[in-house]
């Protein structure tokens, strides 16, 4: 991860991160109760790795999941 390089007060600097946390809370966390912290961590990690990165479509990536977008991106770079 790369640290922020923008000026103080730049509201767009953290927008992708804030969007991710909002999505996580709205789609996953606020709809469930967990018996233990470990169960919450496991469920959230699974949601991120399986659903968010591999299945959920992102409008900022042209309607593709991040894993699919990355595959296509690196395939294009490799063939160029």
Image (spheres, helix red, strand yellow):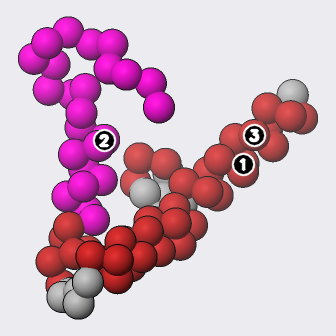
Q: Secondary structure at mark 2?
A: helix
Q: Nearer the viewer, residue 40 or 62?
A: 40
Q: Secondary structure at mark 1?
A: helix
* Sequence order check, earlier mark of 1 and 2: 2
- The stretch in magenta equals 1-24
Q: Is residue 79 above or below residue 72?
A: above
* Label drawn at residue 72: 1
CA distance separating discs 3 and 2: 22 Å
Q: Which residue is located at x 81 percent, y 43 percent?
A: 75
Q: Which residue is located at x 24 percent, y 55 percent?
A: 21
Q: Quadrant of residue 17?
A: top left
Q: Secondary structure at mark 3?
A: helix
Q: Is residue 55 visible?
A: no
CA distance separating discs 3 and 1: 6 Å
* On-image quarter of the C terminus: top right
- Say left or right for 61 vs 16: right
- Disc 2 packing (10 Å; few <14; some 14–19; many ≥20): few
Please tell me whether residue 53 belongs to the stretch shown in magenta. no
* Label drawn at residue 34: none
Q: Which residue is located at x 14 percent, y 12 percent?
A: 8
User: Residue tagged by mark 2?
Assistant: 16
Residue 35: percent from left, percent from top: 23, 90
Q: Nearer the viewer, mark 1 or mark 2?
A: 2
- Disc 3 packing (10 Å; few <14; some 14–19; many ≥20): few
Residue 68: percent from left, percent from top: 64, 58
Q: Quadrant of residue 27?
A: bottom left
* Label drawn at residue 74: 3
Q: Is residue 9 above or below residue 45?
A: above
- Say left or right for 43 vs 23: right
Q: Is residue 43 above or below residue 26?
A: below
CA distance separating discs 1 and 2: 21 Å
* Sequence order check, earlier mark of 3 and 2: 2
């Amino acid at each position: 991860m790369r640290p922020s390089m923008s000026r103080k007060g730049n509201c767009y600097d953290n927008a992708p991160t804030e969007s991710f946390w909002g999505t996580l809370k709205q789609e996953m966390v606020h709809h469930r109760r967990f018996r233990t912290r470990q169960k919450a961590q496991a469920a959230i990690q699974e949601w991120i790795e399986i659903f968010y990165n591999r299945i959920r479509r992102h409008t900022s990536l042209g309607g593709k999941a991040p894993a699919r977008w990355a595959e296509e991106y690196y395939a294009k770079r490799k063939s160029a």
